[in-house]
Image (cartoon, grey):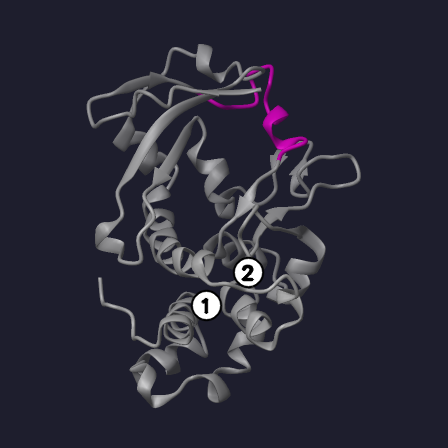
Amino acid sequence: MTQGDYNNPLNDHSTFSFDCHPGISCFTDCCNDVEMTLYPYDIILLKNRLNIDSETFLAQFTSIEFDEGCWFPHLTLKMSDKDACPFLTQKGCSVYDDRPFACRAYPLARSVSRACSQDAQQSKYYLVRHDYCRGHDASRQWHLSEWIDHGGMKVFNDMNAQWISIDTILKSYPFESTGMNMKLFRLLFSAVYNLDNFRLLIDDCILPEMNISNELIEKAYKCDIHLMEVGFAFIHYCLTGETPEKD
């Protein structure tokens, strides 16, 4: 069971005790039987770490989940046959440097107010605790900013801010219950999650009125981060008829 102090968001002066290393008795327990949402940037890092294309990664390592009342899905990490993270080894995480945001953030949870504009988004951090986790008993103290730096979370926050803007639009778009069979749905799904497939469609998808620079498009052919940016701009235009604001 996970408990969170959601009535008391952390501030820059807040401190908390935590540590995680092989010497702690519960080491890697959190890597078992977990439902973990994967964000688009998580998928980019993991599929590149594994040196496989996005379609292969999605098929092997993800499950598609729909929240009630939402027609566009989120993806979760598929557990192994032993109900463990597929990247867990006897020595620990085999993709540690490219691990997902959720793994980096714990023992913190981050909430972000939904808004189409990144400038309007507001985030808060809360301290959470798994009942089995002994890392909270450690003497090591952290400030919020120290933990964010330690986990390399800032770049994830920046990438996820772009995604939240697009996800806010997607969640309000009225896909039918047959959405998974819709051509538009499949195209948008590729632009979010299956970027290697979307890269093959750029020439057919990107129109002059979308106001996406040729320089960015050229970069997108070679760089997944720029490709994600193009994909999000494409989605924004498809569902709103407007070009996204530059934050």
In the image, residue 20 lies in the stretch drawn in magenta = yes
User: Where residue 97 sits in the image (x, y, percent)?
Assistant: 49, 45
Foreground disc of the pair 1, 2:
1
Name the residue located 55 percent from the left edge and 64 percent from the top edge: 175
User: Where residue 5 sits in the image (x, y, percent)?
Assistant: 38, 19
Residue range highlighted in magenta: 19-34
CB contact under 8 Å: marks 1 and 2: yes
**Amino acid type for the residue under numbered disc 1:** Asp
Q: Which quadrant, please, contains the N terminus?
A: top right
Disc 2: which residue: 48
Name the residue located 59 percent from the left edge and 22 percent from the top edge: 27
Quarter-of-image position of residue 206? bottom left
Question: In this image, 59 relative to 151: left or right?
Answer: right
Q: Is residue 214 visible?
A: no
Q: Secondary structure at mark 1?
A: helix
| Vertical side of 247 occupied by 31: above or below | above
**Amino acid type for the residue under numbered disc 2:** Asn
Label 1: few (<14), some or many (≥20) within 10 Å? some
Q: Secondary structure at mark 2?
A: helix
User: Where residue 90 sits in the image (x, y, percent)?
Assistant: 69, 31
In the image, residue 81 lies in the stretch drawn in magenta = no
Q: Which one is in front, 135 or 123?
A: 123
Q: Which quadrant, please, contains the C terminus?
A: bottom left
Dot placed on the residue nearer the N-terminal end, 1 or 2: 2
Disc 1: which residue: 224
Q: Which mark, residue 10?
A: none
